[in-house]
Amino acid sequence: MLKSRIYAFLVALTLAACSDGSDVGSSGVGVGQFKDSNTEGLNYVSGGLSGVTGPDGSFEYEVGTPVIFSVGGVLLGTTGGKPVVTPVDLVLGGTSSSPEVQNIVRFLMMLDSNGNPDDGITISTAVQMAAVDWSPVDFGGIGFGENLSTSFAAANEADPENAGNRFISDAGAAQSHLESTLLCSYAGAYEGTFSGDDRGSFGILVDATTGEVRGVVYSDIDQVSFELTGDSPITFDQNASFVSGNISSGATFSGQFDSVNSLSGTWENAPDGGSYSGSRIGGAADAQYRFTGTFSSGASSAQEGLITFDINGANEVTGEVYDSVDDVLSSLSGSVSGTVLTATVGGSVSVTGTLDRETGTLSGTWNDPEANESGQFTGSGCRLN
C-alpha cells in the first residue's frame, strides 16, 4: 500500500508540471517515442524530466536513467530510454505473446478516443485527469478482465463524448496490433560493414509484410557480391533477432536490432566468420509511411541495391538509394499522388512506379539516360502513424 501511495504522489506531480530539465545538460537528454502505434497522453518520468507523451508518442528522458510510464494512477511499467519504446519493453522478458504485454496493449487500445488504434492512440485530457484517481492495475493478474471493465466504465464516464468509440479488444487482436507496430518500426533499409576472416559492405532490408531480412553483401577480398534471403524473420521480443543467409555459399548472418535504427551480429561461412554492424538509411523524422525495395538493372533479376521512400503528410517523398556494387549512397526526392510515385535521384535518374499505401505494395522502374541504364524495383511498406 505504501508503495502505491508513493507512486500515486509521483504521478500527481507528473500531471502537475513538466520539468524544464535545467539540471540536465542537452547532451544528456534523449527523445523517444512510445508506440502501441503512436500513443499520446501517457505520463512519463525520467530522473528530473517528466511530462505527457505528444501526438507522435514523443517523450524526453535522461540518458542512462529509467523511464516510468503510466496513465494517471495506473503504472504501465519502467524501461531504459531509447528511440522507440513499446509495451514489450515494459515487461521483463516481454514478447508480443506475453499475457502481461497483451493486457497493457488491450488497456491502451481501450482508452483510444476515436476507437481506431491503427492510426495512433490518443488518451483524451479528460481521461488523463480522471485517471489520477484510478487504482493500480495488475496486468499479469487473474483479475485483469474485471479491472479493464472498471477502467472502461471510468473512461467513458470521464469522456462521454467519445464513449461510443471505445471498445475492449481480446488478447489475439491486441497481439496482432502490437506485432504490426513492431514490424513497421523495424521495417526499412540498413547498410553497414562486416569484418573478420572476410570484410566488405552490405545492404539489407526488413520486409514490412513478412519481417524477413534480406539484401546484398559484397566481399572486398573476393570482389564478388551475393544475395541474402530471409531464413528466420525478426522476433517480436526485446531482442528483435533474425537470421539471413545465402543459399549458394552457405553464409549466414545472425543478428539483432540494437534499436529501431541500428543492428549488429555475427556472420559465418565455415570455417570463416566475423562480426558486422549497420544503421538505417532513409528514415525521415516526419514520415507517416515508409516503403523499401530492392532494385536491379537491365534484364537481370539479381539484386543490386536498396531504395527507400519516406512519405510525409503533404505527400512529399524523400529517401535514399544504396548501390551495393559501388557501395554508394544517394538521396532521392519526389512526390506521390494517389498511388502514382515520381522521384529523381541526383537530378538525372528518374524513378516512377506504384506506391499503394492501402495494400503496402511497391513496384516501378528507374532510368538513367546519362549512363544509358535502367531497371526495376519492388518492395513493401507500412504506416508509421
Image (spheres, rainbow, N blue to C red):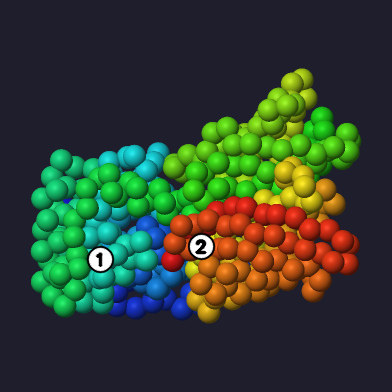
Tag 2 or tag 1, which sits nearer the N-term? 1
Q: Is residue 262 visible?
A: no
What residue sits right under mark 1 in the picture? 115
Q: Which one is nearer the viewer's eye here, 336 or 300?
A: 300
Q: Height in image: 336 above or below 190?
A: below
Disc 2 residue crowd, few under 14, some 14–19, many 20+, Cα 10 Å: some
Disc number placed over residue 57 in the picture, else none: none
Residue at 25% across / 53% down in the picture?
A: 106
For badge 1, the amino acid type reads Gly
Residue at 63% across / 36% down in the picture?
A: 229
For badge 2, the amino acid type reads Asp
State the residue lying farthest toward the top. 271
Residue at 40% across / 73% down in the picture?
A: 54
Tell me the element at label 2: strand
Q: Which one is nearer the viewer's eye here, 144 or 332?
A: 332
How far apart in space, not on screen, are marks 1 and 2 (Cα)? Answer: 24 Å
What residue sits right under mark 2 in the picture? 356
Q: Is residue 232 visible?
A: yes
Position of residue 252 in the picture relative to residue 143 (left or right): right
